[in-house]
Every structure is written in structure tokens, then in C-alpha cells.
Image: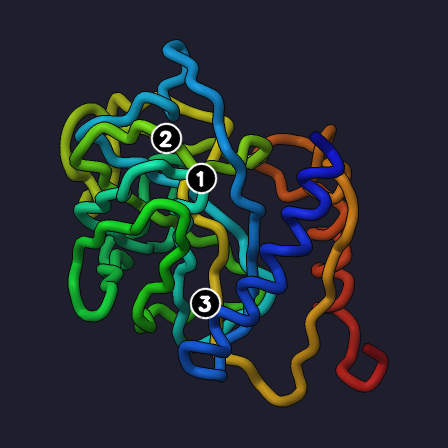
Amino acid sequence: MTSVRKWALLCLLLLSARFATAQSGTWIATWTASPEAADADADNPMLNLENQTVRERVRVSVGGPQIRLLLSNEYGTDPLLLGAVTVGSPRSLAAVEPGSIHAVTFNRNSSIAIPAGAPVLSDPIAFAVSDGAEITISLFFPKRVRTVTWHELALKHAVLSRHGDYTQSEEIQGGTQSPHSIVLSAVLVPVHRSQRVVIAFGDSIVDGDGSTMDADQNWPSHLIRRLQKTGEGAK
């Protein structure tokens, strides 16, 4: 499993860069997670989604005036319908700051059916993020998700709603927590000429295995924070 995750992480980083370059040539990954297949489990709420909203959080490395989302159905055997997707600034696990919600579109459409075995890149979102900022992504799944593409070791709790579209809600009340993330595989920002990419290559230790949940305490996160405190001339 660790060797698969190791190669998947590298391939995702390279895929993200190639995919963004093919689209516009001006975007770079600021957060990534390798997509993984998930075995069926009737007792895992994340693997039995139907007419529900999933709200999950990620912390970017470098900021930018806009972002794009790379969503994955690469292990899906059927098209994956997303009824709505939004981003916002987190206030808590289940809530976002008032007025921070921004709709995500795909070729100017608010919903999309991601083909089986494929990723999809969103339109640019006018949602500015600063270096090291945490963002919330809310995804509405109107139909049963039969085969899930997820990231098992997310190390950030997601919230699964009761039935309904809560992507525009400031808070999801009465939801179920999950230690996994689903569909989201990268966040991208416009590239600056002075930026360079650092790839953390390894097994589940790189992913953060053994670090504190919801605390961004894996060693790549520590490296990012150290680099952000270092002057440009010393990097």
C-alpha cells in the first residue's frame, strides 16, 4: 500500500502540473492529495453518499488572487454527478465565515458529471488565498456514489450532511464526521515566475501518518512554514 501511495503522490503532482499547463499554462499546484480507490464498506458513511453534501478543508502552501480545483473520478466506474461545489473560509469544522462562500463552475456550469476514470479542472474562482491559508470545499452529491475516489489518510475531518444541498450554507448542522477526503485532488493558483515546486516523495510518512489530526503537523507542512519564514534570497 505504501509503495502504491508513493507512486500515486508523485504521479498526481506531475499530472496536476501537466493538466494545468494544458489548460492555460499559468497555474501551479499549491495543495495536492493522491487519489485512491476505496473498497466497498456499508459501515463507512463516506462510501455510501447519496443526496448529501461533504464539507472538507485543506491548507494551501502558496497563495494567489484566484484558485482552481482539480477533482477526480479516476477510480470511478460510473460518471460522478456533482450538483454544486463551493469554496469558503473555514470558521470551524462544519462552518464557514459569513460572506465567504464562492460558487465553483465548470465551463461556466454549476454542476458537472465527471467521466469515469477521469479528473476535471474547475474554472478560475475569484477567491483570493494567502500563503498557508486554510480553505473549505463543499461538494453536493445528488445521486448515490457507487465507486468512490478518495484520499483515505486525509488527517483532516470532513463533515457529511444529512440529505440535501448545503454548499451555500454557512454551517452544516447535525452532520457526521469522517477522517477521509473525497474527490478533491489538487488546489491550484496562478504561477509567478519566481516560484519553484518542491515535491515531497515518499510513503505514508510524507502523507502525515502518525501526526495529529486537524493540526497540519506532518513534516511537509513544517517545511512549508519554514520556507515561508525564509527570505527570498536564501531559498
Secondary-structure class at tag 2: loop
- Residue displayed at 56% across by 48% down: 33
Q: Which residue is mark 1?
A: 75
Quadrant housing residue 197: bottom right
Task: Quadrant for the C terminus, please.
Answer: bottom right
Image location (x, y in percent) of residue 164: 14, 32
Task: In this rendered view, identify the residue nearer to me: 45 or 24.
Answer: 24
In the displayed image of the protein, which residue is found farthest to the top?
43
Q: Residue at x 53, y 38 (%)?
A: 36
**Label whose residue precedes the other's in the sequence (2 or 1):** 1
Marks 3 & 1, CB-CB < 8 Å contact: no
Local SS, label 1 = loop
Residue farthest right in this picture = 234
Looking at the image, residue 149 lies above or below residue 40 = below
Q: CA distance from mark 2 to mark 1?
A: 7 Å
- Circle 3 crowding by C-alpha within 10 Å: few under 14, some 14–19, many from 20: many
**Looking at numbered disc 3 in the image, what kind of residue is underneath it?**
Val
Residue at the limit of the structure toward the bottom, as seen here: 193
Depicted 56 relative to depicted 71: above or below: above
Q: Residues within 10 Å of mark 2 (few under 14, many from 20)?
A: many
Question: Residue 147 — which label?
Answer: 2
Q: Position of residue 103 (x, y in %)?
A: 22, 60
> Which numbered disc flags the more N-terminal residue, 3 or 1?
1
Amino acid type at image mark 2 = Thr
10 Å crowding of disc 1: few (<14), some (14-19), many (20+): some
Q: Nearer the viewer, mark 3 or mark 1?
A: 1
The N terminus appears in which quarter of the rendering? top right
Query: Does any portion of residue 168 appear in the rendered image?
Result: no
Q: According to the image, label 3 marks what residue?
A: 129
| Above or below, comparing residue 144 to residue 98 in the picture | above
Mark 3 secondary-structure assignment: loop
